[in-house]
Structures are given as structure tokens and as C-alpha cells.
Image (cartoon, grey):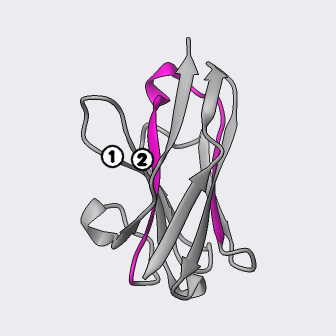
């Protein structure tokens, strides 16, 4: 089992920045691929970014490429999502997710464990 707790969400103006954190406990974090997803009201949960076990491999959704950066600190069992140049359309609940495998992945079905989510609201 893996327990995931997100933090860092909040209200920010368009053009601003936020950094989300996801603290993991349980299964060995060092062998776990991690991802961030988001879900806006009335929409399906969508992929944002993912990172492999050692941080060398990352993937991003086209909508956030160049603005968001995913990273991890295995010593702290934490994965981060740095969000810059935020837009109103980035408003959503952001979820952290963990795989049973070490690689990065982009599909929801590739992730076994999920956090409770943190709200990000961008005002225009």
C-alpha cells in the first residue's frame, strides 16, 4: 500500500505560480513511478505530468508543457509539481498518483494509488 497526501493548492491570479507537493508513505518510494492528474468540474480526470523512479524520465500534457515541472526528492519521499504562468483553465482538483512500477506513465489505469486531491483555483 501507498498513502499519498497532496498539499500546496490554493487561489492564485492568472500568471502566478504554485508548487504542489505529494508526500508518500508505505511502499518503497524509490521504486515507484509517480504522476499528477487533474479534474475540473464536469470533466474527466486528465493527465498532467509524470516522472520515473529516479527523475530522469518525465512526461507532460501538451497543455502544460513549458509551464509545469514535475520533480521528486526520494530522500523526502515527495514529488512536486511546480506550476508557473497559471491560466484560468488550469483550475481543477489536482491528484497525485503512484504506480506499482518504476517507470513514468500517462494513463490513469497505469496508476494504482491516489491521493485525496488539492484544489487549485486560478482567477482571471
Q: Where is residue 122? Give x, y as percent.
A: 56, 22
Q: Is residue 19 left or right of residue 44?
A: right
Q: Is residue 80 magenta?
A: yes
Asked if residue 52 is positioned above or below residue 89 in the image, the reply reads below
Q: Is residue 104 magenta?
A: no
Task: Name which residue lies at 46% across and 62% down.
Answer: 35
Q: What separation in Å lies between label 1 and label 2 (alpha carbons)?
A: 9 Å
Task: Name which residue lies at 45% across and 60% down.
Answer: 115
Task: Name which residue lies at 29% across and 61% down.
Answer: 107
Q: In this view, does 97 lie to the left or right of 124?
A: left
| Magenta span | 78-100
* Residue 8 badge: none
Say whether marks 1 and 2 touch (CB < 8 Å).
Answer: yes
Q: Where is residue 103? Give x, y as percent.
A: 44, 78
Q: In this view, does 13 lie to the left or right of 106?
A: right
* Residue 46 badge: 1
**Under tag 2, what secondary structure?**
loop
**Under tag 1, what secondary structure?**
strand
Q: In the rendered image, which residue does mark 2 sit on?
A: 61
Screen quadrant of the N terminus: bottom left
Q: Give the image quarter of residue 53.
A: bottom right
**Front residue of 6 and 124:** 6
Q: Where is residue 10? Give x, y as percent.
A: 62, 32
**Front residue of 76 and 58:** 76
Q: How many residues crowd mark 2 within 10 Å: few (<14), some (14–19), many (20+)?
A: some
Q: How many residues crowd mark 1 within 10 Å: few (<14), some (14–19), many (20+)?
A: some
Q: Where is residue 79? Give x, y as percent.
A: 62, 64
Amino acid at each position: 500500500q501507498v498513502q499519498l497526501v497532496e498539499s500546496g493548492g490554493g487561489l492564485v491570479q492568472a500568471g502566478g505560480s504554485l508548487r504542489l507537493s505529494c508526500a508518500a508513505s508505505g511502499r518503497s518510494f524509490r521504486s515507484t513511478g509517480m504522476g499528477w492528474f487533474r479534474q475540473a468540474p464536469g470533466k474527466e480526470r486528465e493527465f498532467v505530468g509524470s516522472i520515473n523512479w529516479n527523475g530522469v524520465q518525465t512526461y507532460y500534457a501538451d497543455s502544460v508543457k513549458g509551464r509545469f515541472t514535475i520533480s521528486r526528492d526520494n530522500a523526502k519521499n515527495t514529488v512536486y509539481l511546480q506550476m508557473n504562468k497559471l491560466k484560468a483553465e488550469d483550475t481543477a482538483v489536482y491528484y497525485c498518483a503512484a504506480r506499482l512500477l518504476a517507470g513514468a506513465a500517462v494513463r490513469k489505469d497505469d496508476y494504482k494509488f491516489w491521493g485525496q486531491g488539492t484544489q487549485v483555483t486560478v482567477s482571471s
